[in-house]
Amino acid sequence: MKLLTVIGARPQFIKAATVSRAIAARQDITEVIVHTGQHYDANMSDIFFDELSIPRPDHHLGIGGGSHGAMTGRQIEAIERVLLDEKPDMVLVYGDTNSTLAGALAAVKLHIPVAHVEAGLRSFNRRMPEEINRILTDHASDLLFAPTTTAMKNLSNEGLPRARMHLVGDVMYDACLFYGAQARKPAWFDPLSISEGDYVLATVHRAENTDDPVRLAGILQGLAGAERPVILPVHPRTQKQIESLGLSTPAHLHLVPPVGYLEMVWLEKHCAVIATDSGGVQKEAYFHGKPCVTLRDETEWVELVDVGANILVGANRERISNAIVGVGVMEIKSPLYGVGNSASVILSVMASRLSAASEVGIDS
Ligand code: UD1
Ligand code: UDP
């Protein structure tokens, strides 16, 4: 089977790393990797290929930046050309970025089956670009790999056929288990004179937070009001906004460039609490037993809120500071995201789907 993977943004490199590793262990699947170029800085892209040993992309499209329509449209056009040339048996997409949607749309229109990893996630906030990307990708996909029972229910509620859905757990948990053992302390950590176990680890990059000056200022002030040092690896989108709005930050709020995954995991393992608007980082907080203060008004990972691992505080300065100061120690109650074998389950499902299709001689 020839599988063509479309990736382009930071969280997709981390998700795909676990699946690419599982593919390499099989004889029956070859993978062609297409990097759309959505994320392009070395510390948003290359670093993950290097440190997670992801195979080099076979095709690099170099399409990042610009408006949603321009980026997605150019990506669809370029992916379509690659698909016509490579003629894969199936296309694999991850998550909810513009690269995800572009990969799914290009493939489905060429009648190539699409597999979507992280299917069924919903925030029910249609103003989020990711929400539109998720819904459209799920409805274009032939195989829906849902990480949670909530995601399965969301897919059912939208009338998607049960036969397409597979509850497989979360590939990010696979990544956490495998790469977590290789976590690495950043070289800049000791010179900051911050004690391990006594800092807030924060990330902010959602459009709804960065593009709204009031929300972004509220978040930075809320983080600054935490009674601990804060380490904030800054996404380039956020860095640009902080600079253009001229927002100032106090000395105990340490803004550092984006880090690689191995350093990120070290920071997650050694912090006191995580404050984030990232989807992936909310789950990683849970994996590493850290309480999470989520800088959003809603989350797709509702089970984290239900078990008390995650508190939603939006972008309100006081709520953020109070939540960070008030968090206790998190007790891990149950494995919410599978058992760490999602990648191999996904590959087994894809392989049997394609062999069943070829046996009955239908156009898979
Ligand atoms: C994208 C995804 C979001 C995901 C996030 C992961 C969409 C709609 N959004 O958001 O779902 O959570 O990636 O990080 O697909 N930039 C750089 N260098 C880079 C990458 C981005 O400078 O390597 C800057 C550019 O100014 C760019 C801006 O960040 O225009 C936004 O990048 P974009 O990929 O459009 O969206 P993200 O905010 O990264
Ligand atoms: N991450 C990283 N370095 C950073 C910030 C995040 O390696 O400086 C990792 C993080 O551990 C998680 C993933 O990137 O695995 C989450 O990506 P991001 O927050 O950009 O996107 P989202 O998950 O919100 O779509």
Image (spheres, rainbow, N blue to C red):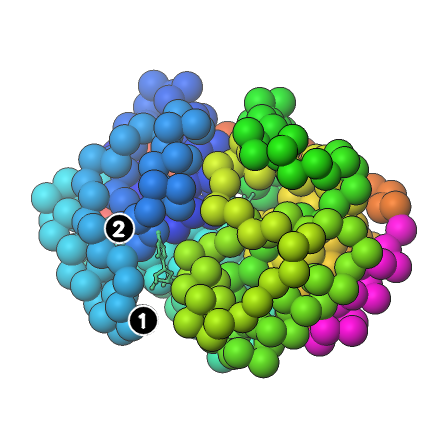
Amino acid type of the residue that numbered disc 1 sits on in the rendered structure? His
Q: Nearer the viewer, residue 196 or 116?
A: 196
Classify 10 Å Cα crowding around label 1: few (below 14), some (14-19), many (20 and above): few
**First reached walking from the N terminus: tag 1 or tag 2:** 2
Q: Secondary structure at mark 2?
A: loop
Q: Position of residue 37 (x, y in %)?
A: 27, 50
Query: How far separated are the C-alphas under marks 1 and 2?
Result: 14 Å
Which corner quadrant of the image does residue 297 belong to?
bottom right
Q: Position of residue 362 (x, y in %)?
A: 26, 47
Residue under pointer 1: 68
Tell me, yes or no, if residue 283 can be seen here. Answer: no
Task: Tell me which secondary structure the magenta stretch mostly adopts.
Answer: helix
Mark 1 Cβ inside 8 Å of ligand 1: yes
Residue under pointer 2: 36
Q: Position of residue 147 (x, y in %)?
A: 59, 49
Numbered range of the magenta stretch: 316-328
